[in-house]
Image (cartoon, helix red, strand yellow):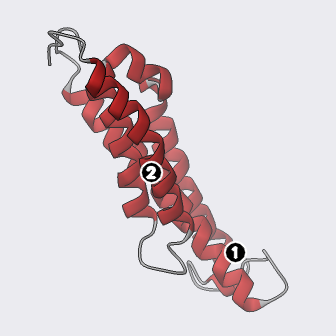
Amino acid sequence: MRRNENNPIIDLISSLVAPFIMLFGLYVIFHGHYSPGGGFQGGTLLAASVILLRLSLGSELGQSQFPRRLGTPLASLGVLIYYGTGLAALILGGAFLNYGFIPFSALAPLRRSWGILSVEIGVGLAVMAVLVAIYDDLLEGEPDA
């Protein structure tokens, strides 16, 4: 995608809207175990805000917020958080992803709530990183990307 002109209105609006999209994405992730939403939806919102900034401000300024080299490591970290939560329950005597066996708290409902939250964080992180990495890979050969 070539950037023919620098439109200050688009730059300003996207710079003002993106933090609110990110905040709402974090809200959706952290309240996904209480209400509709969760890791996938929140991760998609976070990725949309990063991609919005890359589209409007250009690749160089967009890279300052979320560098391209972080895509694969953060996606891997998200999968490891998800898998580690399930593996911890399995090691501690339960079934895979049986949050009641994870020692986050003494109360079983809190253990389940914290277990679900950790899975939602892992999924959100993985989805965000993978979607941004896909966008970056699609623009790899473009001039002025």
User: With respect to residue 141, does 33 lie above or below?
Assistant: below
Above or below for 23 versus 142: below
* Residue 126, numbered circle: 2
Height in image: 80 above or below 49? below
Q: CA distance from mark 2 to mark 1?
A: 24 Å
Residue 71 vs residue 89, the one in the foreground: 71
Quadrant, the C terminus: top left
Left or right relative to 99: residue 31: left
| Amino acid type of the residue that numbered disc 1 sits on in the rendered structure | Ile
Horizontal side, residue 30 vs residue 100: left or right = left
- Residue contact at pointers 2 and 1, CB within 8 angstroms: no
Element at badge 1? helix
Front tag of 2 and 1: 2
Quarter of the figure with the N terminus = top left
Quadrant hosting residue 59: top left
**Label 1 belongs to which residue?**
91
Mark identifier at residue 44: none
Q: Earlier in the sequence, mark 2 or mark 1?
A: 1
Looking at the rendered structure, the kind of residue marked 2 is: Ala
**SS at badge 2:** helix
Q: Is residue 93 visible?
A: no
Residue depicted at x 39% and y 62% = 40
